[in-house]
Image (tube, rainbow, N blue to C red):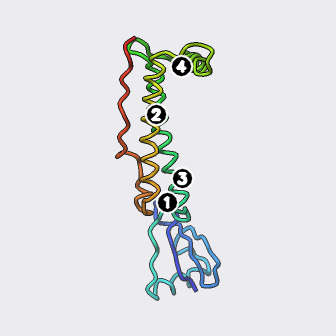
Amino acid sequence: MIIEARYTDETQVPFNATFDDGREMSMPGYPSNTHYDKDVAAFLDGGGVFDDYDPNYGVTDEQLRWQAYRLNEEQADSHVEAAERTPDTLTTLDDVGLNKSLKRRNNRAKGKDKITDNDDVLADYIDSVIDVQGSADDIVENLARQALIDWDGSGVSYPIWTPPLG
């Protein structure tokens, strides 16, 4: 006897049915012209309904939470990279220039050269972005399932990078 049925894609045609003994069956649609049609008919006649397609079926809250954390991290990283690409008002770096700039800044941070004022300004900005990401992660930590599903980070307000004078 079928105890649950749910659509498995947006077309609401193929579905999975769960039997009272724990078996699951996938069907391309109903009627399927198989011996399972009588089980599906009995389920529907008994008041059963097909649950709507849920793209998050089987996804745990913890998995949704980690997806939201990754989204927060990607958004923060994009703000940091945009700032690193414009280290001052006169400079916009391509990929090669960005890599060189990052290496030079890392060498200065290791004490090989003197840290510049622009390095300090950028480091302060990166710290503020990371702080906002941490606050966004704190929000995600306490969200209920539907809010986790809906999380897109659009309400997070990252600081604006103002490059120092070149």
Asked if labels 2 and 3 touch by Cβ distance under 8 angstroms, the answer is no
Three-letter amino acid code of the residue under disc 1: Pro
Three-letter amino acid code of the residue under disc 2: Asp
Whole-number angstrom distance, CA of label 1 to CA of label 4: 39 Å
Q: In the rendered image, which residue does mark 4 sit on?
A: 98
Whole-number angstrom distance, CA of label 1 to CA of label 2: 36 Å
Say whether residue 153 is left or right of residue 35.
Answer: left
Q: Nearer the viewer, mark 4 or mark 2?
A: 2
Quick one: label 2, few (<14), some, or many (20+) residues within 10 Å? few
Query: The C terminus is located in which quarter?
Result: top left
Q: Secondary structure at mark 1?
A: loop
Q: Secondary structure at mark 4?
A: helix
Q: Which numbered circle lies on residue 66?
A: 3
Q: In the rendered image, which residue does mark 2 sit on?
A: 127
Q: Is residue 42 above or below residue 98?
A: below
Residue drawn at the location 62% of the way across and 81% of the way down? 35
| First in sequence: mark 4 vs mark 2 | 4
Q: In the rendered image, which residue does mark 1 sit on?
A: 55
Q: Nearer the viewer, mark 3 or mark 2?
A: 2
Whole-number angstrom distance, CA of label 4 to CA of label 3: 29 Å
The foreground one among 144 and 108 is: 108
Q: Secondary structure at mark 2?
A: helix
Whole-number angstrom distance, CA of label 3 to CA of label 2: 22 Å
